[in-house]
Every structure is written in C-alpha cells, then in structure tokens.
Image: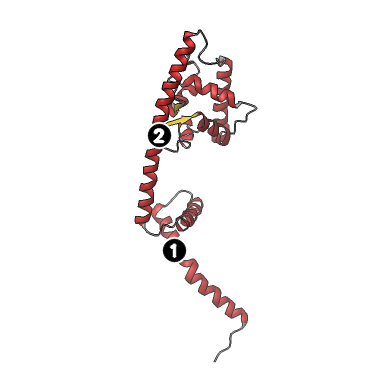
Amino acid sequence: MAKFSSDEMTSAAKMNYLEAKVNPVIQEMVASLLQECPRDPEQFMMHWLMEQELFDRGGVHTLEDAEAQQAEIDELKAEVRRLKQCKKQASAHYRSVIAEERAKRGLLNRPPLPREAIERIRREIKRAAYVGFRGVDLNILFTRFDTDGSGELDVDEIRRALRRTLRITPRLVPDHEIAAFCSVIDADYSDTISIQEFVDFVNDTTHVVQH
C-alpha cells in the first residue's frame, strides 16, 4: 500500500475542497457571466457573489420563495404610497387652513427665501452633480431616494440626497435653507415634491415660484 506524505495529503484535501465547494460556485457564476456578457465582468462577478450571499442569508431557497417575498415587498410599497398620499392630503388641508388664517391676519404665509439664496442653492446642486458624477441626470439621482416609487420626495429625503450623494455640507447649504428651498417649490403645501418638478426647478434659473 502506497504511503502519502503530509504535503500530498494536504494537496489532495485541497483538491477535494475545490471540487466539492468552489467549482460548483464558479461554474454557476461563469454561466451567469456568459449569459449576460457584461461590459465589466469583474464588477458583475462581485455583484453576483454579493447577491448569492444575500439570497442565502434571506432564507430564499427557490424561485417561488423569491417571488413570494417580492410580492410582499410590492404590497408594502403600495401601502407606503397609500399612507404617503393620505399624509399629503391631510398636510395640504392643514397647511391651507393655516395659510388662510394667517392671510386673514395679514401675516406672511412663509418666511421668504431671497432669490440670491435660491440661485446659490441651485448652483451648489448643479456643481456637486457635475463634479461628483460627470453631469449625471439629476432625475435619476433623486429617484434613488424614492423608496416607495411614488415619484415624490419629502424634505428629509431631499436633504439626505443632497448630503449623502451630492456631498453638499451644512456649511454650504444649511438644513433650514433646504427646507425653505423645498417650500418654494411645494405650491400645494403637501410637504412632498415631485422629483421631476424639483429637478426642473433646479435647472430652470429663470423660474422662481412666489407664494
């Protein structure tokens, strides 16, 4: 009976490990790679491995499981949109009542944001988008923060987009100016702004909304 050295036994164990554990994963990944033929294969493989890890850790074992979870996610998103719409309607009614009452008393409905401040905020948003993202479409950028798919963002979501993605610091644009900037666009007092409306307002330097 032939005797094997410890090095040979270690090599054999490693080969068995590759055959049993690694090769199946690589084969599946390569099959996905060849099916998609992405322009950046390295990035594709990294995302593929991350997706497998999330897939495994999420308790999803079959396509049916994945579809069931996706259906549940879609239902939750629909419920979020419904609640957001309810909040929008209630907020619009509340704000309009307040505005009418303030108008009766001869008070300003909103603290005005100077035109110079509006133009400065516009410049900061466009500068940050151009420098950091080589002129990326702002519509696409802000849509990433529309988690419920409603096509609208509230002030906090816009602030997070400006802070986290565009890296606009409070020194350049304070939080209260972001809120005031949004209120200029929020003509119906709903506390939410259409992404397209926000982007159009940022890009249109000739348009200033007056309330």
Give the foreground label among 2 and 1. Answer: 2
* Residue type pointed to by label 2: Leu
Residue named by callout 2? 83
Res 149 visible: no
Q: Which residue is drawn at 57% across and 28% down?
A: 127
Q: Earlier in the sequence, mark 2 or mark 1?
A: 1
Res 97 visible: yes
Which quarter of the figure has residue 126? Answer: top right
> Is the Cβ of the residue at disc 2 closer than 8 Å to that at disc 1?
no
The one nearer the camera, 32 or 113, is 113
Q: Is mark 2 on a helix, strand or loop?
A: helix
Mark 1 Cα within 10 Å, few/some/many (few <14, many 20+)? few
Residue 115 image offset from top left, x and y in percent: 55, 15
* Residue type pointed to by label 1: Gln
Q: In this view, does 132 lie to the left or right of 86?
A: right
Report, in whole angstroms, how far the alpha carbon at label 2 lies from the one at label 1. Answer: 45 Å
